[in-house]
Image (spheres, rainbow, N blue to C red):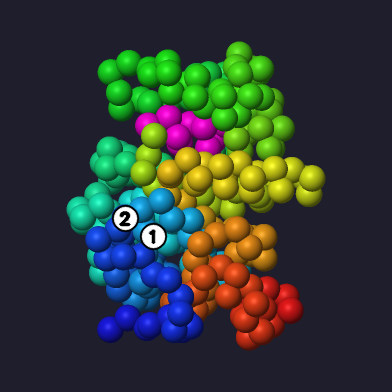
Amino acid sequence: MSQQAARSEDVTLPDPDEILLAVRDLDAGYGDLQVLSDVDMDVGDGEYVVIVGPNGAGKSTVMKSVFGLTTYMGGQVVFDGTEISRRSPDQIIHEGIGYVPQNENVFGSLSVRENLEMGAYILDEVPEDQIERIYDRFPILRERSTQKAGTLSGGQQQMLAMGRALMLDPDLLLLDEPSAGLAPDLVTEMFDRIDKINDDGTAVLMVEQNAKEALRRCDRGYVLVQGQNRYQDAGETLLNDQQVRQDFLGG
């Protein structure tokens, strides 16, 4: 049986008919190493959900498991009514999920535009209208469209990685530590861009090291500890919970 995450009675959970992603009793890891045990998690249609917790808690493993990049050991991952637990990343992309890993998330030897085109590789032809929408969302990418991605700044590479993941207009965007390695003055800008992506209708599931800022902005949050659910609640509620702050947010 899964370990029920502690939550307040008044937290607003997604309506069952509006759950886009449902993770149930998930056991997963790498090879013979089990990292996640009985993890439960929901993302509603258009919702913004954040996973926080200490280093080594299994946060990134949840994201990779949803995207088919770990060893599946049990439980279910259901997306938009379809079980995807045993599917490959190529198959999962077709279902409407985009994923931005924390590291090595651009093709450094390719230009900015070529990176965006790679985001639409499953299509017969590159959707020019979608590239234009990405350029409108991230104007710096238009300015640097012919520049090699490996020569971009860290913040620009993160924008490019998100832009590539958005090329297929996914229903759910998975973001793994999007502010990692960014200069402090760029972190707020990155969060603002993620807010806008969510405001435009894309559901977001994000792992983030800047837990306080992420919880301020999200709809709901999960606290993961040693590969298991510990707390779930509205972002602001978790942020203001004295026990959560003391144990996981630095007071």
Residue type beneath disc 2: Leu
User: Crowding at label 1, few (<14), some or many (≥20) Cα neighbours within 10 Å?
Assistant: many
Q: Which residue is mark 1?
A: 43
As for residue 166 lying within the magenta part, the answer is yes
- In the image, 162 versus 44, the foreground residue is 44
As for residue 43 lying within the magenta part, the answer is no
Residue 172 image point, x, y percent: 39, 47
Question: Spatial distance from mark 1 to mark 2, Cα to Cα?
Answer: 6 Å
**Residue at coordinates 67% horizontally, 60% vertically from top-left?**
213
| Secondary element at tag 2 | strand
> In terms of image quadrants, where is residue 207?
bottom right
| Secondary element at tag 1 | strand
User: Earlier along the polypeptide chain: callout 1 or callout 2?
Assistant: 2
Residue 173 visible here: yes
**Residue at coordinates 63% horizontally, 63% vertically from top-left?**
216
Residue 239 image point, x, y percent: 63, 73
Whether the residues at callouts 1 and 2 have beta carbons within 8 Å, the answer is yes
**Residue at coordinates 43% horizontally, 56% vertically from top-left?**
47
User: Crowding at label 2, few (<14), some or many (≥20) Cα neighbours within 10 Å?
Assistant: many
